[in-house]
Image (cartoon, grey):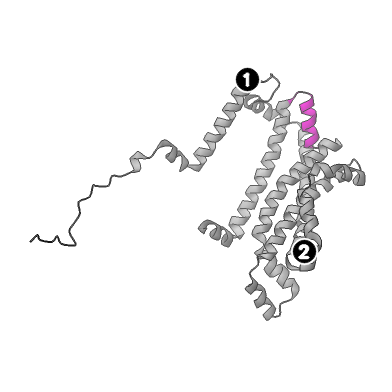
Amino acid sequence: MRRAEPSGAAVATRPVRDASPRRSVLARLSSSTPLVKIAGGVLVLGAWEIVVRLFAPAYVARPSSVARALPQALASAGMLRAAGVTLRAVVEGLLIAVLSGTLIGLAMGRIRVVDRLLKLYVNGLYAMPMVAILPLLTIWFGYSPAARLATVVFAAFFPIAMNASDGARSVPAEYLEVALACRARWTDVWFGITLPSSLPYLLAGLRLAIGRALVGAVVAEFFISIDGLGYFILFQSRTFHHDAAFVAVLLLAGFAVGMDALIGWFTKRHLRWYRTGDSAA
């Protein structure tokens, strides 16, 4: 009769080797986010430089020529004046769009009648290209800076209103029930509960609105031919000064990146609960 092996007998296993020396170069690079971003930018700029030198005419912008033109363009009084005009119009339009879009979006999210009245038109106008509405705005406001401001407001209003509406609908019902049970005033319910709870949605809409506002301002300056970065880019491109035109494009991109970084800082500083929930997910 064979003797049974004890149930707790140790089973010989191979020693587990440390896998860290075997990590690939790609895995090591992916763990360093700044290094990956720098490497991606270097690859894009290098490919751009090589393709333009090999296949494009001499007047086409490339990274080396843009870098040489950058100090002179930034010191140009004409470019600085154009940048100030365009960015001021964008900021003014964003302020108008944020105030009006937030109020209308909150009303759409909390009042069913307002939602039924406006939702179809807000969604439809949001999908409409800005270029299609621009000729009408020039008829109403003339070929003037007012038409550019109207274009910026039109471009930025709808993403803010739609996101504010979605944020108002997402407020937990128990928050509103407690407020009503405590006989809170409607202003406290709207601006003390609904608006703070909708802030993540509003910030997402603001991120979309910034890009659309910049595009709207530049397109309006293309079409109306008024002073601004859009007309500066158009003029420099038509006179084959592509390097200076691309510096203006970089200035617009820098403004958008700066605004996005400001929103990210505000979220991290004042909406830590939102960041915590986002990271935990």
Q: Residue at x 75, y 71 (%)?
A: 187
Q: Which is more foreground, mark 1 or mark 2? A: 2
Q: Is residue 45 above or below residue 143?
A: above
Q: Is residue 215 above or below residue 5?
A: above
Number of residues whose C-alpha sits closer than 10 Å to that of mark 2, classed few (under 14), some (14–19) or many (20 or more):
some
**Magenta-colored segment: predominant secondary structure:** helix
Q: Quadrant of residue 58?
A: top right
Q: Position of residue 12 (x, y in %)?
A: 20, 51
Q: Which residues are magenta?
A: 228-241
Q: Residue at x 58, y 56 (%)?
A: 268
Three-letter residue code for mark 1: Arg
Tell me the number on the disc at residue 53. Answer: 1
Residue 179 showing in the rendered view: yes
Q: Which residue is mark 2?
A: 115
Three-letter residue code for mark 2: Asp
Q: Is residue 123 above or below residue 65?
A: below
